[in-house]
Image (tube, rainbow, N blue to C red):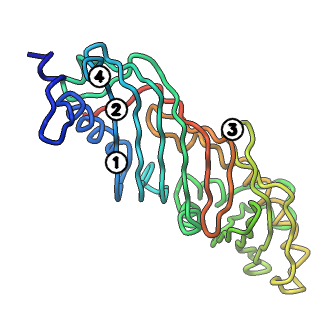
Amino acid sequence: MIGGFVGIPNNNGTDWGEQMLNTVANNTIRHLFTRSELVEVSVRCYPSSKLLQGSIDSFRMKGSGLVIRQDFRTEEMSFETDAVSLDFGSLLKGKLSLKQPTQAIAQVILTEADINNSFKANLVRKHLENVSIPALSELSGNQPISFTDVEVKLKQNNRIQLFAKVNLCDRGLVPISMTSTLAVERRKSILFKDTQFEPDSIPEELREISETLTTALDGILNKMVDLDRFNLDGVKLRINRLETQGKRLVFSGYAQIERIPNNP
């Protein structure tokens, strides 16, 4: 019976076993994300009899409009593995379980709008609002300060321009303008390098204060963007390189897949 199940093609020429595998994989992967516009999963296993031993040739996922951890949207995300070993018994129960961890080539694309929206997420705001910075104690009157209204513009050659505001009680709202080059550290952290204060858009009487606040914000940003905070359940993303392409930021790297979570 099982032999027939994994070996008989349907009207489209696809084995029943492979069709079942694709259905289970699609249902499982969709639940990795808070929301999704499109998720396409393709699993290849030829000949299909290999499925009885839990062996498949490749596992590919491509999605768009994927939201991770409630607030972080990606324009596109894709990954593809080589051969993978699955638990066939779990598959028959409608679940997808790995016999051993695997890796996949991965690509993630963020739009400029995605990046700016991420600065509104609670996970990010807690690093930027009501922070105490000893070096600014005299400037802030020993009060915590908040960097708000953060806006990022993507430029060529991995450069960005960033604007923000800080409300200082005795000086009112102080604008910040800076440029930086995005770089990758240890394949999991994003650094803001070669940061430069941009005074042209800052009122002359506030430039000295704004430059001091820019230095403080740069220090916060360089400690904040760690991919481990944004990993999917059971899946860790690692970056080999990043590149700005117009209004999009493209990350290329790989995914370490320890396990695939299943529906409750």
Name the spot of residue 47 as percent of width and height, x first: 29, 22
Give the residue at x 26% y 23%. Answer: 48
Q: Nearer the viewer, mark 2 or mark 4?
A: 4
- Give the mark nearest the N terminus, 4 or 1: 1
Secondary-structure class at tag 3: loop
- Give the mark nearest the N terminus, 3 or 2: 2
Q: Is residue 77 left or right of residue 5?
A: right
Which residue is identified by label 2?
44
Q: Is residue 5 above or below residue 218?
A: above
Which residue is identified by label 1?
40
Query: What amino acid is at disc 1?
Result: Glu
Q: Is residue 258 above or below residue 252?
A: above
- The Cα atoms of the two marked residues, 4 and 1, are separated by 22 Å
Near-viewer residue (138 or 101): 101
The quarter of the displayed image where residue 27 is located: top left
Secondary-structure class at tag 2: strand
Near-viewer residue (106 or 173): 106
